[in-house]
Image (cartoon, rainbow, N blue to C red):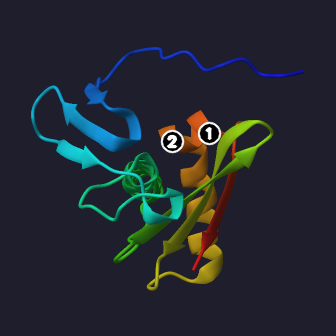
Amino acid sequence: MSQGPSVLEKRLYTATATSTGGRDGRSKTDDGALDLAIVPPRALGGSGAAGTNPEQLFAAGYSACFGSALAHVARAQKITTGPVTITAKVHLGAVGKGFGLAVELVADLPELPREQAEALVRAAHEVCPYSNATRGNIEVDVRVA
């Protein structure tokens, strides 16, 4: 049986951003903290002009969020991780007549034994909001470096 979408029990924070011009435009947050040129990457026919793209923004958001989820799990388990680095690669590709995404998340926890690092990463993948939003929708490969 398929599990339906999760419903927020309580909204803790709302981020608001507005974009104009699609992949060749601008994105801004309502508080002014983010105001970026959005440009297509060269791989998609872009000119190489300064700016970012939706996949880079998703990769930055997912890696930061996953790092926080991992820190949350580590605190709950009273584990001192040392430095943690999360690298996200967001792949854009063809899916049928449209487009889709796939994600690779690589966690580097050099001060922890591999088995403990892998357990933390698995637990973080269960609580991370980005992981919960993508689960069952796109391929997400999560691993320890």
Quarter of the figure with the C terminus: bottom right
Q: Position of residue 73 (x, y in %)?
A: 47, 53
| Residue at image coords 27%, 26% | 18
Examine the rendered structure and indicate whether residue 120 appears above or below residue 10: below
Q: Amino acid at mark 1?
A: Thr
**28 with respect to 109 (left or right):** left
Q: Which residue is mark 1?
A: 134
Mark 2 to mark 1 CA distance (whole Å) = 6 Å
| Residue at image coords 38%, 71% | 80
**139 with respect to 67 (left or right):** right
Q: Which mark is residue 130?
A: 2
Mark 2–mark 1 CB contact (< 8 Å): yes
Q: Amino acid at mark 2?
A: Tyr
Q: Which mark is residue 108?
A: none
Examine the rendered structure and indicate whether residue 47 appears above or below residue 106: above
| Residue at image coords 38%, 34% | 22
| Residue at image coords 46%, 68% | 87
Quarter of the figure with the N terminus: top right
Q: Nearer the viewer, residue 22 or 107?
A: 22
